[in-house]
Image: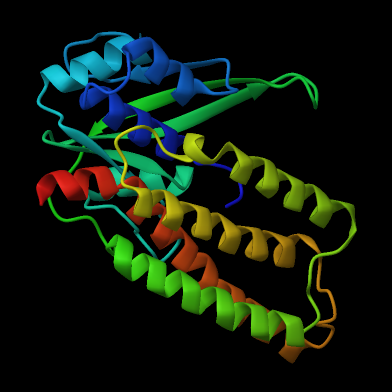
């Protein structure tokens, strides 16, 4: 949860492009980020994979007026609306983009090659039909903000009692990654998003930092089975709340347009 999902970048900058707030080249550059290349496969009207710039233009021609994010997990089809085939692909990837205005969705498949520190990453977005229905379990920005504040407070209390506070090099690296991300501020979301969406996404990443540190630092002081069970019980709803908030932030552009 510390890293930005590729579906978030595609939706945010795709929405900015659809709104005419950024150029196609700038949108594609922001979406690809540190990856080598992104392509879209299965796009209606195209017999072979195409680049992002052409794909986004084609989606607009097909009637797409906005892009939503889905971040599903086992037992939690967050942001999905079906059909089962699309949901299964999205669940395997743990993310997807669902188009607004056309019954299409995009699921990333990531290919990596090369040694550690010099990994070449290519992403193929598979364009698939989706069911036109309300996305599952997506809160409003206001709901997400309230839930995050409560989850952060409750989890901090429980995890502190179980002695799983972050420490060591892994924790320090995670903290530095979050600080660097926070300092980038305006790059967290593309132009056109409301300030509240940026605030919710920032808070969601703080919650993600807490969850990541707790998971990555082993069992901490939670040495008994009951204590480890309590820690997992504390983390699971926090992680779920953080994912819901991320989806609410990325989807805020489409939600505002619908209102």
Q: Position of residue 104 (x, y in %)?
A: 20, 34
Quarter assignment of residue 122: top right
Q: Residue at x 57, y 83 (%)?
A: 154
Q: Residue furthest bottom?
A: 226
Q: Residue at x 44, y 55 (%)?
A: 199
Which residue occupies the foreground of this view, 132 or 160?
Answer: 160
Q: Residue at x 74, y 50 (%)?
A: 174
Applied colour scheme: rainbow
- Give the vertical position of 148 relative to 72 (above or below): below
Left or right placement of residue 170 versus residue 206 in this view: right
- Give the vertical position of 187 relative to 242 (above or below): above
Which residue occupies the foreground of this view, 245 or 234?
Answer: 245
> From this viewpoint, is residue 193 visible?
yes
- Give the vertical position of 93 relative to 9 (above or below): below
Quarter assignment of residue 246: bottom left
Q: Position of residue 152 (x, y in %)?
A: 56, 74
Q: Position of residue 203 (x, y in %)?
A: 51, 60
Q: Residue at x 22, y 14 (%)?
A: 57
> From this viewpoint, is residue 85 visible?
no
Left or right placement of residue 145 versus residue 132 in this view: right
Q: How many marks?
A: 0
Q: Position of residue 80 (x, y in %)?
A: 28, 52
């Amino acid at each position: 949860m510390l890293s930005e999902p590729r579906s978030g970048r595609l939706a945010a900058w795709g929405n900015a492009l659809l709104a005419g707030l950024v150029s196609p080249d700038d949108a594609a550059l922001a979406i690809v980020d540190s990856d080598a290349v992104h392509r879209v496969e299965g796009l209606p009207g195209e017999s072979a994979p195409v680049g992002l710039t052409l794909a986004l233009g084609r989606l607009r021609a097909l009637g797409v007026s906005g892009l939503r994010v889905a971040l599903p997990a086992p037992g939690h089809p967050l942001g999905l609306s079906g059909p089962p085939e699309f949901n299964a692909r999205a669940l395997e990837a743990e993310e997807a983009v669902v188009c607004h205005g056309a019954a299409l969705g995009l699921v990333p498949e990531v290919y990596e090659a090369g040694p550690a520190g010099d990994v070449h990453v290519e992403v193929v977005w598979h364009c698939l039909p989706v069911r036109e229905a309300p996305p599952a379990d997506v809160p409003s920005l206001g709901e997400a903000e309230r839930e995050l504040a409560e989850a952060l407070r409750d989890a901090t209390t429980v995890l502190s009692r179980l002695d799983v506070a972050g420490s060591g090099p892994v924790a320090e690296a995670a903290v530095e990654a979050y600080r660097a991300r926070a300092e980038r501020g305006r790059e967290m979301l593309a132009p056109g998003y409301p300030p509240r969406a940026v605030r919710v996404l920032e808070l969601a990443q703080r919650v993600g930092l807490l969850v990541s540190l707790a998971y990555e630092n082993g069992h901490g002081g939670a040495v008994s089975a009951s204590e480890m069970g309590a820690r997992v019980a504390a983390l699971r709803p926090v992680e779920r709340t953080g994912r819901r908030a991320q989806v609410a932030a990325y989807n805020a552009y489409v939600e505002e347009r619908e209102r």
